Each structure stands twice: as structure tokens, then as C-alpha cells.
Image (tube, rainbow, N blue to C red):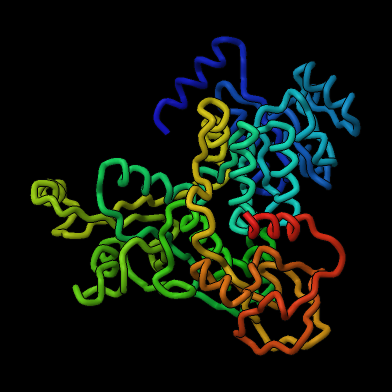
């Protein structure tokens, strides 16, 4: 994001800064707090988490002195402390998005139901909203994006998340007029669609991570959801339900992503996919029909052609989120958003045989994994989006392992703002 550093430096030279409100002080949120502390023209003024100790830990780890930190439980306290230049820790998310001094809200909860509520209320309070919650984005992001435009604020995914990093490559190549063949990411663990928190428990303990989070990586759901977000932003689609997931090196990508009739492994161009073997990077496969361009690409050691790979070997997750915060505030522009509406859908698939009367348990759990498909196909099947899955959903009839769940197979017990928002989106 060229020039953001100079824009932030200018803001600080004027005695101003972007006031950031963060909701969710887990690993990603705390990392963002520390990163912002080293930046110009930006400050994390209020952070909410149901466990306030997480917030305090984040402030302390960022090197913020104890005298500058305050805990608050009311709007009046937050207003007073923020105006006094303090760093404020709260439990209630509404104390973040309702605070008049907050310019940009970041959702780092990772929970679709909570993320949808945060995004909606931030928009209604005329705050820019940055989503470190791709699960919520692929479920109701198309609706939230349109709502934000009506309110004159920005709804955006995050730089540093793989979809945001892929979008940078896409926009670079697209602006230059290259034909983009495929967009993708590396997967850093073998696909095991039946992984669950019991399987990942020991590894999670070693890494200090959540067993459910690791299970969502291993069972492929996270990858499906991330590429779903890219599809909704670009209009690209999976070449096949669930994508191919071939193995290969960076150097092999241009030959893999050629049509089958040309010696490659794909059926069509403009697809999203993932590769085993190039993690943690992201990539774009590009081509050109211009002879001079091909000659120069060869001269530049980009390969023999006609396909070439643009590869970004890293993505810094929440450490890059401040760039999306800055772009939203300074330019009112997203890093990535569902510009194309619902192009793809990640549907819920049974991890095991499910019996009538069973309850689902959410992403990375024991009951379902996600599989990305074209939206129209999922709609025809009446398939249940993975983002709507929670412990409040009861199975109405027996479901066999690896069977796609439909709306007719389940019953939501109680109310869900996320489900209501999804219904509104489906009726757009």
C-alpha cells in the first residue's frame, strides 16, 4: 500500500491519529495492538474482550505503561478515559463501537455470529469496520458491504490475512492488464477432513493454540473459507467443488495451472485454488497474449511462459491489519470486500454419520467441515453455509458422513442475528 507511511506521518505531524477500537484480544488482536504501538498516526484507544485480562496482557506486552491503562464499564468512563489519552480495557463490545472517538473498529473475534453483530453495529454507528473474521465475511459480507456503502463508511477484510494478500497480487496484475488465470494460497498441513479438537489437542498444547482452530486448518475449512472470500471479491470460481489442492513448488505452479488440453491440470481459467507445498505464501498465475510482454518476462527471469507466477512468500496476519485500518480511514477504500456479491459458498459437510436429534458444534469441531462451491450450485442444493453452523442447530434426520447438509436437514433453536442477516442478504 504505497504512500500509507507518509500519510500517517503527516497525520501525526498535525497532532492527530486514527483512533482504533478492537474487539477480541486473542493472539491476533494482541499482536495488532503491539504493531500499532510502533506506528505513526494511529492508536488503539479501546479494546473489548469478555476476559479483560487478555486486554491488559495485550497492553502490557505492547510496552504501554500501567499509568496509561484504565478499565471501564460504562460509556461515560470510556469517553472520559479516551479523551484523556488513556488506553481503555472493557468487556462490552458496544462500548467500542458506540464510542464517538473511535474512527475504525476491528473485529478479531473469529466467531461469525459475534462478528456479524459487531460489523452491523459499527456501520450503524458510522464506523469503518475491518474484519479479521473471514467466516462472517463469506456468510453475510455481501450484505454488510452494501450497508456500509449506504452509510458512507468502509467495510473491509484485512491486509495480512491470505485473502487480503491475494487481493494485492490480483489488483497489481489486473491494473497492468495481465490475464489472471488463477489465484491461490499454500496449505501448510495435509488435508484431513475428519480432523477434530481431539486429533489436534497435543499439537495445540505444544503451540499454545486452540484445538478447534487447528482442526479448522487441518480439515480444510479455513482454506475453503479464505478462497471463498477471494471468489466473492474477484468473481473467480472453484474449478471443482472443494478445489483441486494439488501439490507442487512455486516453480511448478505455471505448468499446473494450465488447461488440461494444454498439458496442465485445470479445466478453465479465472479460478481459485490452493496448493500443498508453497505455504505460507499466496500466488497469482498470470499470462499475456502480447509477444513483447512475453519476451520481457523471459528476460526478467519470470520463466519461459506463457504462464507466470506472482508469489508473495509471507502474510503477516494481524500485524498487517493496521494497513487496512489506515486505508479505510484515509481513503475510505477496502483492502478486500465482496465486490462481486455471492460468487462462491462454503457449505457444511458431515464429518461423521450424524443422527436425528444431534447438535452441530461449529467450525473446527467434531461434526462438519467446509467445502467451497459455486454459489448458484449451493443455492440449487439448498446447502447450509458453514458460517451458520453453531451449537444451537439440531439435526432433523440422519445424515451420512461426507453428505452436504441442507437447510431442510437442520433446525435452529432460538434466535440468531447472523441467520436473520443472511436471510436479508438472500433477499437482496
Quadrant housing residue 324: top right
Q: Nearer the viewer, residue 232 or 169?
A: 232
Residue 13, placed above or below residue 240? above
Residue 350, position as x, y percentages in the image: 65, 81
Residue at the limit of the structure toward the front, as seen here: 427
Residue 329, position as x, y percentages in the image: 57, 28
Residue 79, position as x, y percentages in the image: 83, 23
Residue 271, position as x, y percentages in the image: 38, 63
Residue 337, placed above or below residue 350? above
Would residue 205 be visible to someone looking at this image?
no
Which image quarter is the N terminus in? top left
Would residue 113 be visible to someone looking at this image?
yes
Q: Kindly identify the residue that appears in the image at 85 percent across and 69 percent down.
A: 413
Give the left or right position of residue 298, taking residue 72 as reference: left
Residue 84, placed above or below residue 46? above
Give the left or right position of residue 303, taking residue 200 as reference: left
Give the left or right position of residue 370, taking residue 301 as reference: right
Q: Kindly identify the residue that appears in the image at 59 percent across and 57 percent down.
A: 138
Residue 290, placed above or below residue 74? below
Q: Kindly identify the residue that appears in the image at 78 percent across and 17 percent down.
A: 83
Q: Nearer the viewer, residue 170 or 28?
A: 170
Q: Kindly identify the residue that appears in the image at 82 percent across and 43 percent down.
A: 53
Which image quarter is the C terminus in? bottom right
Amino acid at each position: 500500500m504505497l504512500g500509507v507511511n507518509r500519510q500517517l506521518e503527516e497525520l501525526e505531524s498535525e497532532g492527530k491519529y486514527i483512533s482504533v477500537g478492537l474487539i477480541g484480544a486473542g493472539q491476533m488482536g494482541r499482536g495488532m495492538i503491539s504493531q500499532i504501538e510502533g506506528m505513526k498516526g494511529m492508536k488503539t484507544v479501546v479494546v473489548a474482550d469478555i476476559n479483560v485480562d487478555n486486554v491488559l496482557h495485550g497492553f502490557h506486552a505492547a510496552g504501554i505503561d500501567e499509568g496509561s491503562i484504565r478499565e471501564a464499564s460504562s460509556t461515560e468512563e470510556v469517553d472520559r478515559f479516551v479523551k484523556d489519552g488513556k488506553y481503555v480495557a472493557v468487556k462490552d463490545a458496544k462500548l467500542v463501537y458506540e464510542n464517538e472517538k473511535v474512527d475504525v473498529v476491528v473485529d478479531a473475534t473469529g466467531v461469525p455470529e459475534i462478528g456479524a453483530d459487531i460489523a452491523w453495529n459499527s456501520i450503524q454507528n458510522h464506523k469503518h469496520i475491518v474484519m479479521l473474521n473471514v467466516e462472517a465475511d463469506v456468510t453475510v459480507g455481501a450484505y454488510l458491504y452494501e450497508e456500509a456503502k449506504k452509510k458512507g463508511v468502509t467495510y473491509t477484510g484485512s491486509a495480512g490475512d491470505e485473502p487480503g494478500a491475494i487481493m494485492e497480487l490480483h489488483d497489481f496484475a489486473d491494473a497492468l492488464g495481465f490475464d489472471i488465470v488463477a489465484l491461490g494460497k499454500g496449505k501448510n498441513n495435509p488435508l484431513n477432513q475428519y480432523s477434530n479438537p481431539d486429533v489436534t489437542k497435543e499439537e495445540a498444547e505444544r503451540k499454545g493454540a486452540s484445538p478447534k482452530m487447528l482442526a479448522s486448518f487441518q480439515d480444510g475449512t479455513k482454506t475453503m473459507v479464505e478462497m471463498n472470500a477471494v471468489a466473492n471479491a474477484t468473481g473467480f470460481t472453484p474449478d471443482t467443488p472443494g478445489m483441486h489442492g494439488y501439490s507442487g513448488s512455486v516453480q511448478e505452479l505455471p505448468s499446473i495451472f494450465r488447461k488440461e488440453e494444454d498439458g496442465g491440470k485445470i479445466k478453465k481459467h479465472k479460478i481459485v485454488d490452493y496448493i500443498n507445498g508453497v505455504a505460507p505464501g499466496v500466488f497469482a498465475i498470470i499470462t499475456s497474449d502480447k509477444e513483447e510482454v512475453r519476451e520481457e518476462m523471459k528476460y526478467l527471469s519470470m520463466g519461459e511462459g506463457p504462464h507466470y507466477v506472482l508469489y508473495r512468500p509471507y502474510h503477516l496476519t494481524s500485524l498487517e491489519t493496521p494497513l487496512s485500518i489506515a486505508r479505510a480511514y484515509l481513503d475510505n477504500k477496502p483492502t478486500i470486500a465482496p465486490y462481486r456479491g455471492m460468487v462462491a459458498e462454503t457449505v457444511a459437510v458431515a464429518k461423521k454419520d450424524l443422527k436425528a436429534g444431534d447438535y452441530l458444534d461449529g467450525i473446527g469441531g467434531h461434526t462438519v467441515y467446509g467445502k467451497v462451491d459455486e454459489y448458484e450450485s449451493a443455492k440449487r442444493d439448498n446447502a447450509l453455509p458453514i458460517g451458520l453452523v453453531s451449537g444451537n442447530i439440531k439435526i432433523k434426520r440422519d445424515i451420512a458422513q461426507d453428505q452436504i447438509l441442507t437447510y431442510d436437514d437442520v433446525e435452529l433453536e432460538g434466535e440468531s442475528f447472523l441467520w436473520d442477516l443472511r436471510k436479508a442478504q438472500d433477499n437482496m
